[in-house]
Image (cartoon, rainbow, N blue to C red):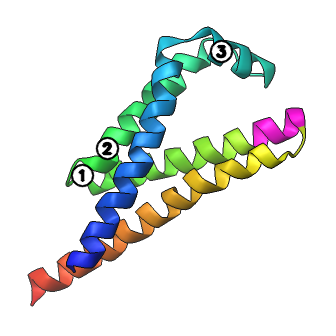
Amino acid sequence: MKKTNYIYWIITSLFSAFMTFTAIPDILVLPDVVTFMTHIGYPVYFIPFIGVAKLLGSVAILIPGFPRIKEWAYAGFAFDLIGAIYSVTAVEGFSSSTLFMILPFTFLILSYSFYHKRNKMMHKAAVA
């Protein structure tokens, strides 16, 4: 149980940090972000919205409890990452830099998997 707990918190913390670090420039609507997002076809008003959503999702997956909100946050992150990969690939074509997105997507899947594994173990311990 301890090993699963440690792995969950390490992976989830790293994933949450990544998403937070990508959210901050969006929230601040930095010029580089505006250039990139408008290049791939998103309107400027979408930028702070997605930044705030990523920040709230990062907080949601770190706070204990609130399982339904966590599920929504994980789903939102999946949509965000899949949408980002699709948008960049649709506009610029596939490139080796797109492969970088495998890393945060892998962390998302691992965090979600260990979240459920951890909950299942805690439920068994509470029942026993």
- Per the model, the C-alpha gap separating discs 2 and 3 is 27 Å
Q: Quadrant of the C terminus?
A: bottom left
Horizontal and vertical percent position of residue 113: 43, 70
Contact (CB < 8 A) between labels 2 and 1?
Answer: yes
- Badge 2 local density, few (<14 within 10 Å), some, or many (20+)? many
Horizontal and vertical percent position of residue 96: 81, 48
Instruction: Decide which of 105, 99 is in the foreground and name it.
Output: 99
Residue 90 vs 61, above or below: the answer is above
Image depth: mark 2 or mark 3 in front: 3
Numbered mark located on residue 60 in the image: 2
- Badge 3 local density, few (<14 within 10 Å), some, or many (20+)? few
User: In the rendered structure, which amino acid carries the disc numbered 1?
Assistant: Phe
Contact (CB < 8 A) between labels 3 and 1?
Answer: no
User: In the rendered structure, which amino acid carries the disc numbered 2?
Assistant: Ala
- Badge 1 local density, few (<14 within 10 Å), some, or many (20+)? few
Q: Range of the magenta residues?
A: 86-92
